Amino acid sequence: MHNISNKLLDDCLKGDRVAQMRLYDITLPYLRGVVRRYVFNSSDWNDVLQEAYLKIFRHLHHFDAEKGTFISWGARIAINSAIDYTSKSSLKWVSFEELSDSDVFTLPTAIETLTAEEMTLELKKMPTDFYLVFMLYIVDGFSHKEIASMLGISTEASRQRHSRAKKWAQANLSFLPDVVTKRHEK
């Protein structure tokens, strides 16, 4: 990822359209990847990204480099935008209790044949409430307290969903290595 300079951010804060476009161009590939993990329908990705960028530019003055990188701050905004979008959309999320035996899919023969995108597609077959917590915790590194706040659930519910997500992944995605279901603590 390109280094995002303080000068670029300062120019964006001053309303410099060229600087804003440069920031957009630098961050778009990463933030698009973030949104794709949380929004299942590809036709909705641009709407979520547009909302995320509106928030990023509207609240740029709140960014604090002492608390983290710009890209992690922007990713958090993109994740929140994606979660807000999916919770407000008319999409019906499948809960764990609604799954039947017919929802189980055929497993590929080797993990080496899967791309990161294909692996994400397999993980998206997980019940959505589990998937969200799984991705927020394992991939994006949020704590259960942060996840609970983002999703409007209790910390215990976040832990419970993470545990159930791991069990689901282990039962339904036996081709995944153990490392996919574990997050290394710092």
Image (tube, helix red, strand yellow):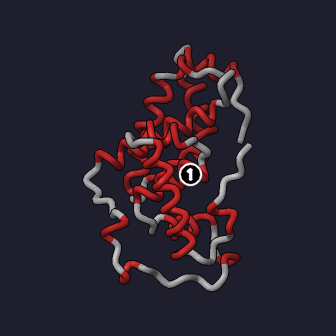
Res. 152 image quadrant:
top left
> Which image quarter is the C terminus in?
top right
Q: Nearer the viewer, residue 166 or 107?
A: 166
Res. 12 image quadrant:
top right
The percent position of residue 173, horizontal first and vertical second, equals 56, 74
Q: Is residue 36 visible?
A: no
The percent position of residue 170, horizontal first and vertical second, equals 57, 72
The residue positioned 45% from the left and 23% from the top of the image is 58
Circle 1 crowding by C-alpha within 10 Å: few under 14, some 14–19, many from 20: some
Q: Nearer the viewer, residue 4 or 160?
A: 160
Residue furthest to the front in view is 156
Can you identify the residue that label 1 sits on?
Answer: 33
> Which image quarter is the N terminus in?
top right
105 versus 81 height, above or below? below
Q: Is residue 167 visible?
A: yes
Left-right relation of 47 to 171? left
The residue positioned 63% from the left and 17% from the top of the image is 10
**Three-letter amino acid code of the residue under disc 1:** Gly
The residue positioned 65% from the left and 25% from the top of the image is 67
Element assignment for label 1? helix
Residue furthest to the left in view is 90
Q: Nearer the viewer, residue 35 or 148?
A: 148
The percent position of residue 98, horizontal first and vertical second, equals 30, 69
